[in-house]
Amino acid sequence: MPDTPDEQNTPAAATPHGNAPGPTTARIDIAERPSRTAGSGAAFLALILYLALIIGAIAAIARVATDAFDKGEPTAVALAVGASVVLALTLLLMFTSLVVVVPGQTSVRQFFGRYIGTVRRPGIALVPPLTNGKRVSVKVHNFETSEIKVNDLDGNPIDIAAIVVWQVADTARAVFAVEAYEEFIKTQAESALRHVATIHPYDEPGPGETSLRGGTDLVSAELAAEVAARVALAGLEIVEVRISSLAYAPEIAQAMLQRQQAGAVIAAREQIVEGAVTMVDQALKRLETDDIVTMDDERRAQMVSNLLVVLCSDQRTQPVVNTGSLYA
């Protein structure tokens, strides 16, 4: 069979300076294609034929051996050798041309090192003889990356891990383009996770930024896209990527917890003050509208101060009853 373009190595780099030798890399450009196979009916007929040949060869060898022992015919040895050759060839053809594929598995067929196609249809199939196959699972796999320590966009050390769900989409690339595709995807997933974590802050994102803690869905989608781009050359498909663990590194976890607590206290204080000012404003307007009491600016300021102290204080305040004149 003539070589096809999808099985040739494509050089990816040239020498940088004239005749000076430079580093070169080669990427295997190959794609999955269906193997030439016959259906289950033809496979069963071939199996019956092979079994008949095996039984016939064994019977011939036994008969020739018996005749040679009884009559001492010299030609019996040659006949026995011929029957043995037929038996060996039949066994070889049977074991190399019949393949059984279970659901979720494929058989990548090679003919003396040349890729000739992939068998995906479950069941027994008749393939070209003298070919060998490598079983590749196309089931959905998943794994969790190890928890890695990396600095986020703000330079804070964090611990992060992710769960990757994947499956083999192109069996030819998975077998021939990389050395071990299962180890390859694990390494590339950790590399992509490290890169994505460094371009996002842990929290408190700026304008146009997405935090790791607040934008988990967006970060997971970005991580899935990057992992998919990295493993595409190995014929692997990313089903889903999710962040499974995210926390500050132990050395700064306590300091960051105190910062978060301080931020929560400040936010609560802002809300309390805003509510207190609103209540004081409503009280003054109500007093003036209903003409309950008339106060000058000094007494108004004193009343506002007292109300704010009462409303914003952390502890219970003790009331003081004034039995004299306000202007005394």
Image (cartoon, rainbow, N blue to C red):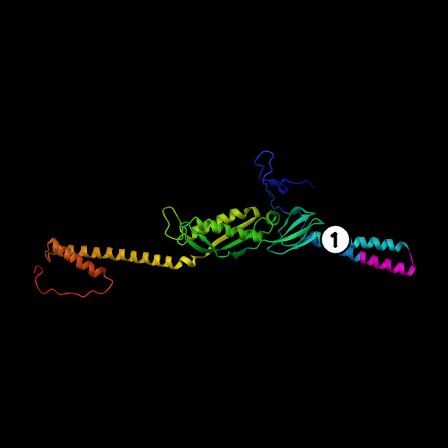
| Callout 1 amino acid | Leu
- 283, 204: nearer the viewer: 204
What are the residue bounds of the magenta stretch?
57-73
Q: Residue furthest top?
A: 18
Q: Mark 1 falls on what kind of element?
A: helix
In the rendered structure, the answer to whether residue 100 lies left or right of residue 158 reads right
Quarter of the image with the N terminus is: top right
Residue drawn at point x = 21 percent, y = 55 percent: 277
Q: Position of residue 158 (x, y in %)?
A: 43, 55
Location of mark 1 (residue): 92
Q: Position of residue 187 (x, y in %)?
A: 54, 52
Q: Position of residue 18 (x, y in %)?
A: 59, 33
- 108, 315: nearer the viewer: 315
Residue 95 visible, this angle: yes
Residue drawn at point x = 84 percent, y = 54 percent: 81
Is residue 121 rendered magenta in the image?
no
- 73, 48: nearer the viewer: 73
Density class for disc 1 (Cα within 10 Å; few <14, some 14-19, many ≥20) is some
In the rendered structure, the answer to whether residue 123 lies left or right of residue 187 reads right
